[in-house]
Structure formats: C-alpha cells, structure tokens
Amino acid sequence: MEEVPLLKTLSAKYAKDAVILGISVDVSLDRVDRTIKAKGMTWPQLADGKGFDGAIPTAYHIQGTPELFVLDRAGRIFGRNGSAARIETLIKDALARPPRP
Amino acid sequence: MEADLVREQPNPDAPSSVQTPGMSTVNRSVLSRAASACLFAALIAAGGQDRTARAQTAQPASSPSVADVRQMAADARKAIDSYKAAGGAADAANHPAIESSATIWQIHERAPRSEAGTIAAVEAIRLLNRAELWDNAHARVASLDADDPAWQRVPSLLYEEGIARKRVDDTIATLSRTIASTTVAANKAAALVVIGRVHRRQGDLPAATRSLEDARAAAPGTPQAEEADGLIYEIKYLTVGLPAPAIAGKPRNARRSITLDSFRGKPVLLVFWAST
C-alpha cells in the first residue's frame, strides 16, 4: 500500500467535494483492521474477508490490486486506473462535470 | 476529459500482475540467480561446440526448467535496460537482446512443445520487443507454427506492440492469419481474445463482444475462455458511463453502514487494495 500517502493527500484535499471509499481484498479481517490503523487510513473501509471472491471485488471484476475507479456525481463509472498516481486528474475531471440537474 | 475508456489489463504472463492478498512479492534468492548465470554461460558455450562435444558437456543445460528460462529472461532484461540506459543504439548489430533472445530461443527449438520451450519462445520474442527490435521479433513470430502452444501467449505480445507503435491493424492481421491456420482451439481463442481487446480499446464494443464470444465458444473451459468471459462482463457492466455496481456495507472503521447511492452528487473514488 505505497499509495496510502497519496490517498491521504487526496482525502484531505477533496474532503468536501468528493468521497473516498476503500475496499480491501485481504482474506483476514484482522489484517485489514491492523493495516487501517497502522497506515492511518481514515476514510471508510469495506471488507468481507473473502478476498477477490467477495461481492464487491467480484462485481467490479477485480483481478489485482491496487485498482481504482472514479465514479461521477451521478454514480456512473467515469474512469479506472491500476495506480493512484494519475487518479487525481480523473477526480478533477469528474468534479468539473456539473452536478446532475 | 481524460477518462480511460479501458484500462489495459496487466499482462497475464507477468508473475507479479495478480497479487494474492496478504502476499508480497519475494525476490528470487541470490543463489538461484548465480545458478542461472552459470547455466546461461553454459548454453552460450554449448552453442559454439560441435554436436558431439555438446552432447558430452551440456547435458544438464539442454533441458533447462521453466524457472531457469524465466531467470535467464530476467537477467537479459536487465542487460537490455542497462544497454539502453548507457545510450546504446537500438539498431546496433551488437545489441545484447539479439544474443540473449537467440540463446533463449534455442531452448524452444530443442523442445518446442515442452513447457520450458514454450515459455522460451515467448520470452525470446518479449526480449526483442523490449529492445524494440521489431523486425527480429516479427521473424520469430512468423517462424512459430500456428499450433505451437506459445501462440496462447504471443497474441498479448503482439497487442502490446500494436498499442505501443499504433499499429493495431497489423496486430489484427497477424492474429487473423493464426486463427485461420491453427487447429488448436486454445490458440484460436487466445488470438480472438486479443482481437476483442483491440476492438474494445478502439471503442467498438459490439465487435469486441463478438470476438470475445467467439473465443469463449472456440475453447470452452480454458483460461482463454475465462478471460473472454471476464472481458465480456467488463464491457457489459463496467464500461465508462454505465451506473457503477451497487455497494453497501458497514465499514470496518465506522459505526454506520453506507451505500454508494448515498454519495450521489459527489464524485467517488473507489480504492481496491490489499495489505502487503
């Protein structure tokens, strides 16, 4: 999770305007909890301990991590990326879209 | 608007592309690296000997394992990268990729249908691609029998080349020839999957779906069919502009349950992660 520092920055920068939601594919919920604490991940974290076979990773066809999706204001898929590095551009673009009428 | 319509899948051949949760990548030991270097030297030496001498001295080297081949390829990649970093000319006759890929290709020629031989063919072509020695790579691909099991992996190399060089029409043409001439269902399916990927990347989702459905029908129950299934699913449910699949649950670090719907009005960043 070398992406955590960047995600923290994004979380602070866009706290008012966007939502960050984490989904762990760890198979040990203890491990999830430990990582959340150790890394100081303050945004909401979902996990069911079923790894890639969990309901959410299955629905999003997750084959590896990290994997990031940006959804627009209407909850539609706006983009995806296998790294956090270029994700801020996507968030900015999604924010630039006017709110749903 | 820079939204990626389709993010390219990680290369299925790259061992680190799919991470198992709770597992971090462990480097091969220094020991096996050293052993591989010896093998590499032995193979090169064997190449210069006559048949009798080779049979006497190079017996173990004539049947390298899959791990040996992968290690040789890893070492060769490093050599190519150092050569590039040092400003070596891409078209030089002494480009390190020419020799290393030829050495690895020999493993394929000695045992074309074995697992190690199959991976050797793929790795040899991949090294030439890495060095951007496209003509050399094409010559290897052209010499590969359409029924060779390496054709289950070569299509993704052609895809990478097609994308990198903006020549996906060539990629489709090469794959179509293999589809027409192979009698191996998995080879046909692998080529069809990559044609599906090309169409998807170009935004032609109906053509992509047709190709992927053909792949699935050509070789049911194979990894290629499974891959086609996954891509068909992505096109149907995860294409840009479609409503995101529902999410609901109680976060590990919050008291109250959340739903994706409740975030309407704000963009949402979903981060799928695993502890390392």
Image (cartoon, coloured by chain):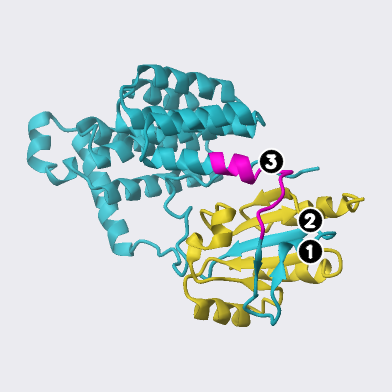
Chain colours: A yellow, B cyan
Viewer-proximal residue among B118 and B22: B22
Q: CA distance from mark 3 to mark 1?
A: 23 Å
Q: Closer to us: mark 3 or mark 1?
A: 1
Q: Give the overall secondary structure of the magenta segment.
A: loop
Image coordinates of residue B139 in percent, x first then y, are: 40, 22
- Where does residue B49 sit, x and y in percent of width and height? 16, 33
Measuring 37% from the left and 36% from the top, which residue is drawn there? B220
User: Mark 1 sits on what residue?
Assistant: B263
The numbered disc on residue B5 is 3
Seen at 31% across and 27% down, the residue is B184
Q: CA distance from mark 3 to mark 2?
A: 15 Å
Label 3: few (<14), some or many (≥20) within 10 Å? some
Snapshot quadrant of residue A95: bottom right
Q: Quadrant of the N terminus of chain B?
A: top right
Circle 3 SS class: loop
What number is the disc on residue B111? none
Amino acid of disc 2: Ile
Q: Chain of mark 1?
A: B
